[in-house]
Image: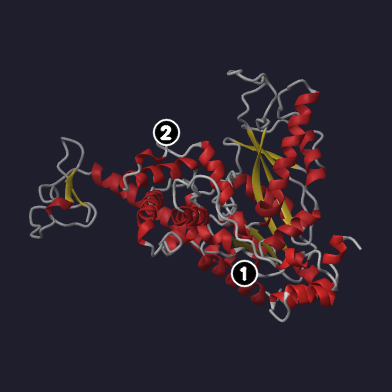
Amino acid sequence: MSTFALSQSAAFQEAVDAVRSKRLSVRQAAKTYGCATTLYSHVRVVKHQQTGRPTTLSELEEKVVVRACIALGTFGYPATRDLVGCVLKQYLADVGCQSSFPSGEPSKKWWSAFFKRWPELTERKPQHLTIQRAKCCTPEVIDGFFTKLEEVLRDEGLLDLKYSDLAARLWNCDETGLSTSVTSTKVIVRRGDKHVVKVGSGSGRENITVLACGSAVGGKLPPCVVYKAKTADPAWMENGPIGTRYTSSDSGWMEEAQFTELFCSVFLPATESVRKSLPVILILDGHGSHISLKVVTCARENNTIIFCLPPHTTHILQPLDVSVFRTVKRAWSQILKIYKTETCQAVVTKKSFPSLLKKLWENSVFPEHLVSGFRATGIHPLNREVIAHGALNPSMPYTKCSYDRLTTATPITEKITSIFKEHFQAKLTKPASKSGRLQLNYYGESVTSEEAVHRLRERERQKKERKKKRRNAEVYLALPLSSSQENLCQGCGKDYENDTTDDQQCWIGYDKADCRRWYHYW
């Protein structure tokens, strides 16, 4: 019997257990079980001593750096070599060890040895996540979404349906942009060349919007293409996927008029046989182009419920974003590379786009991708536990302001921890850019068709009131002034001269020199 086979035998394992439990000595166990040649090497414990020169930082100091890097990565603000180098430079200067690193910061050799000492750390390229998405994807928001979805399914009598029957009534639609340029990849050139270029045609900045729609049972509707143009040329509609709808807009993105037409002429006819007895639920984001009074009214009349996702949560809760579009973008990149090679870098025009879209749609969008998307988001089967806690961790700094993973009770490493906290706090206080998109639902809120109708009508009423006030103000400014009206506020009617309160700073004069009107803006 070989040494390896002997070490895997049941008798050998019993001998090892007997020695480790101190029931037998090594000699007694070897004699009893007949395995003297290898038993000692398996039961002994070897403590390796660190070799070489001492490290720049102590083991305790490096442990704090490791904990801080892991915590920052969990919060969505992963540390870089520059950040860690800046922290260590400041820390070593505070403790009087500026000469620890000859260049002032850790070298490549130090980083290589550091990663070997701490194998739990590695370097990866992160995915971009906006601050709005990080703030909105809290456990409370996700839990509220599933609670409301479950209420809608229960109220409509859909929870008691069979798996496949309910899956046929759950739909999701969303747009994605397909670029006409190939993403840059590494090329093979001579070492030392500083000007490496790749000749290609076109500006490489055009995106064509494609609307996809699929169900939890794996059914998919033909895509809808939106070109950036005043009108869509018939030549741009040839050789595409069967049943594809083509339209155009000034911006090249889906707008209210285009989505309304596609919803009424594509989605409703395709789901007519399914929604005869029980309603169909269409899950989408609350972008202004998706929700209009006409769309919601048409949905109610055709036994369809529109369910809006909470804002900035589509990367977690939208099936198409989670499972389909990533595969589609990867396959589209390969199709473009093949096309550029076969046509000698020809431009992808609107006329050639439909044929490429047909290859993409038939070879990349499969029913199992749609089923997987609904399952991964927990929508079908309904399961809120499938959302990984790691996906919600970036919201922790904005909800709890907790630095527990950065803290330590060791006085020696208190300075390192405080420096990391300063950098982390600086990133949290950075203002987020405001989005110009019109949203129907508010932070952390899911909206159904009934609520959408009420809000859209309220929005229309407020819009009419604002127009009426502007017309009245224009008429008021055009009227001649009497001496008693010169000091009256055109908004609330207060008199500037007789105002005895201490809010004189709340009065402003009209912007024209020949006008003596006053306005009270409290």
Name the element at disc 1.
helix
Which quarter of the rendered picture does the N terminus lie within? bottom right
| Foreground pick, 127 / 66 | 66
Residue drawn 77% across the image and 51% down it? 221
Residue at the limit of the structure toward the right, as seen here? 1
Q: Which residue sits furthest bottom?
A: 23
* Residue 103, numbered circle: 2
Give the percent coordinates (x, y) of residue 116: 59, 48
**Front residue (pair 198, 151):** 198
100 displayed left or right of 336: left
The quadrant in which the C terminus is found is bottom left
* Residue 2 placement, left or right of 232: right
| Residue depth check, mark 1 versus mark 2: number of the one nearer the observer | 2
- Residue 80 lies left or right of residue 278; in this view the side is left
Q: Quadrant of residue 407?
A: bottom left
- Image height of 19 relative to 202, above or below: below
Q: Position of residue 110 (x, y in %)?
A: 51, 41
Q: Amino acid at mark 2?
A: Ser
- The residues bearing labels 1 and 2 have C-alpha atoms spaced at a distance of 58 Å
The residue type indicated by label 1 comes to Leu
Compared with 123, 219 (above or below) is below
Mark 2 lies on a secondary structure that is: loop
- Residue corresponding to mark 1: 149
Residue shown at the point (71%, 63%) measured from the top left: 375
Mark 1: few/some/many CA within 10 Å (<14, 14-19, 20+): many
